[in-house]
Image: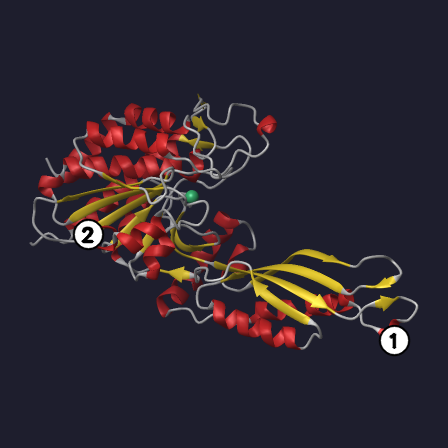
Amino acid sequence: MTADGELLGFLDSERDRQVDFLQRFARIDTANPPGDTRQAADLVRAFLDKEGIAHRTEAPKADNPNIIASFEGGKGPGRHLVLNGHLDVFPVGDRAAWQRDPWSGDIADGRLHGRGTVDMKCGTTAMLFVFAYLHRLRAELPGRVTLTVVSEEETGGKWGTGWLIENCAAEVLGDCVLNSEPSGVATVRFGEKSMVWLRFTIAVKGGHSAYPHTGGSAIKVAAALIQDLPAIESMMPDEPDTVRRTLDRPEVQKAVDQSLGAGAAGVLRRVSVNIGTIQGGVKINMLPPECVLEVDFRLPVGISRAAVLARVADIAKRHPGTRFEELLPGGPEANVSDPTHEMMGHLLRRAGALLDAPPQPIVSLGGTDTRFWRAMSVPAFVYGCSPAGMGGIDESVSIAEFHHVLRVHALAAVDYLAAARPK
Ligand SMILES: [Zn+2]
């Protein structure tokens, strides 16, 4: 039997086992904060043990374990494929608003319920099974496959993927990364926007409102600044050619709007500026001496943090008494992999064969751990279930999509590894 045929056998004959694992995973509270993932890590390790797969735990913070497992294929050297998923999930929020226990793992109407089932217990479970099935087929595959199941993704990844990339690079970098964060089955994501958060403080002399000639108004200055900042939205991104050509295609723009909401195609490729908070003034008859604004900038691929900060500095200079500081200094840049990379082709073809129409390659508005690999020039691609309900009340995932995502990743992984086999 071919590797494909055997793989399809595992995928189909173990559907109940796949759902059972996802259900048990969904029943473990891994809300972050606090982000204690030890019990979920036990579940993953028990699964790997049962499959006879060696693994190792790297826990720079004891309650944030990261699991690495890796094997060599039996057909000689080839490509090194890395699979990535995270254990932690968003907090529950208002528990009273949930119809079911957020950790119920209940199955109803083809959906599995629980906090984090969408982001990303469904995807992480899919990667675990993909890894186990590839391991069973290892005698027929060239190259190497590495699984990274990490913690602390929801709070930045410093102790999770970020730590592994910094401290275990030889093992976890690889040649290409598959990640199954929720993307919606109609899109494959090859890049993501970044964010810059700034706090502006405007300080002027102030005084009595009957004597406006004696001191300025920080709120007036803030109002003028608020008028000027959106000029940054007209900055033109310098996108790599392959990215520009991909995102220019009308069918891709349509997919962006469908996947991210109407109007998203316009937002995706420019800076967006949100004045999130404003605080100022002391009393109705006082000239306000201080006003503080917090502003969230989202940067597209092809516009650097430094370029935005320079434009902001230019604008701030024109407004007396204004200074600003970064709230998330040293954050990631918008990042992108080549949308014409071979792996993209495998994902689009394998998913397209199972759907009415092939998915489209797009860039994501939100961030994932794939940025750590992209920062090291390792191509990384995201394909997962629908993001609908992610992080919301009554989160639940479609079981059919879970099986679909698992299948697409498994088949694309075999395509990618087998393509390096000497003819
Ligand atoms: Zn996630």
Q: Residue at x 53, y 30 (%)?
A: 394
Mark 1 in CB contact with mark 2 (< 8 angstroms): no
Say which amino acid is labelled 1. Answer: His
Residue 260 rendering spot, x and y as whole percentages = 51, 49
Give the secondary structure at mark 1: helix
Q: Nearer the viewer, residue 64 or 154?
A: 64
Horizontal side of residue 274 vs 113, given as left or right? right
Which of pointers 1 and 2 indicates the residue nearer the eye? 1
Residue 178 rendering spot, x and y as whole percentages = 30, 48
Say which amino acid is labelled 2. Answer: His
The image quadrant where one finds the C terminus is: bottom left
Q: Which mark is residue 231?
A: none
Q: Nearer the viewer, residue 338 or 283?
A: 283
The image quadrant where one finds the N terminus is: top left
Q: Can see residue 195?
A: yes
Query: Is 389 located above or below residue 77 in the figure?
Result: above
Disc 1 target residue: 213
Q: Can see residue 337?
A: no
Horizontal side of residue 142 vs 293, given as left or right? left
Q: Residue at x 35, y 61 (%)?
A: 375
Q: How many marks?
A: 2
Query: Is 205 located above or below residue 164 in the figure?
Result: below
Query: Is 202 located above or below residue 44 in the figure?
Result: below
Horizontal side of residue 307 vs 57, given as left or right? right
Disc 2 target residue: 80
Residue 137 rendering spot, x and y as whole percentages = 14, 38
